[in-house]
Image: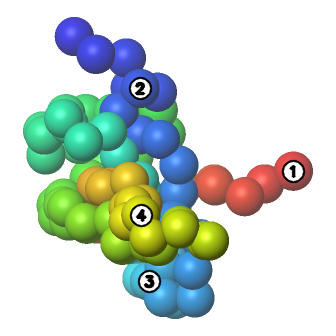
C-alpha cells in the first residue's frame, strides 16, 4: 500500500478553490498514478474526515517556447482531485 503522503502532494491555492472550501469541497494536487479509492483513503487517514465523493482531473501541461531559440517545450502534466466531505473540515492553513 502506498503512503498517504505520497498520494496527496499539495492543496491547490486559488480563488476558486478557496470559495469551494466554504461548502466542504477541497482541491489537491495528487500523484498521477493515484486512483479515486486511494485518494479517498489518503484524505481520510491524514485528516480523519469522512469523504463523500472524489472527482479527478488530468491536466495537460501548457506548451512553452524557449527564449532566444526555436525550441519548444512544455510544462509538466498534473492530476488534481476535487474532494467533497460528508461533514467536518480540513485544517489546511493553520500556523
Check whether the beta carbons of the residues at disc 4 and disc 1 lie within 8 A of each other: no
User: From the viewer's perspective, is the residue at label 2 or at label 3 nearer?
Assistant: 2
Mark number for residue 6? 2
Check whether the beta carbons of the residues at disc 2 and disc 3 lie within 8 A of each other: no
Look at mark 1 in the image and give the residue it sits on: 95
C-alpha span from label 2 to label 1 = 23 Å
Image quadrant assignment for residue 75? bottom left
User: From the viewer's perspective, is the residue at label 4 or at label 2 nearer?
Assistant: 4
Which residue shows up at 22% across the image and 10% down it? 1
Task: Determine whether, in the image, residue 93 is placed left or right of residue 88.
Answer: right
Check whether the beta carbons of the residues at disc 4 and disc 2 lie within 8 A of each other: no
Determine crowd level at label 3: few under 14, some 14-19, many 20+ residues with C-alpha closer than 10 A: some
Seen from the viewer's position, the closer of residues 32 and 86 is 32
User: From the viewer's perspective, is the residue at label 2 or at label 1 nearer?
Assistant: 2
Check whether the beta carbons of the residues at disc 3 and disc 1 lie within 8 A of each other: no
Whether residue 11 is visible here, answered yes or no, is yes
Q: Position of residue 32 (x, y in %)?
A: 24, 42
Mark earlier in primary sequence (4, 1): 4
Look at mark 3 in the image and give the residue it sits on: 20
C-alpha span from label 3 to label 1 = 21 Å
C-alpha span from label 4 to label 1 = 43 Å
User: From the viewer's perspective, is the residue at label 4 or at label 3 nearer?
Assistant: 4
Mark earlier in primary sequence (4, 2): 2
Tag 3, which secondary structure? helix
Amino acid at each position: 500500500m502506498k503512503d498517504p503522503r505520497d498520494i496527496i502532494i499539495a492543496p491547490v491555492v486559488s480563488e476558486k478553490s478557496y470559495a469551494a472550501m466554504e461548502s466542504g469541497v477541497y482541491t489537491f494536487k495528487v500523484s498521477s498514478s493515484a486512483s479515486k479509492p486511494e485518494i479517498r483513503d489518503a484524505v481520510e487517514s491524514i485528516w480523519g474526515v469522512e469523504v463523500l465523493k472524489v472527482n479527478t482531473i488530468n491536466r495537460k501541461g501548457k506548451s512553452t517556447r524557449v527564449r532566444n531559440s526555436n525550441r519548444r517545450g512544455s510544462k509538466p502534466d498534473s492530476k488534481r482531485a476535487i474532494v467533497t466531505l460528508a461533514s467536518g473540515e480540513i485544517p489546511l492553513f493553520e500556523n
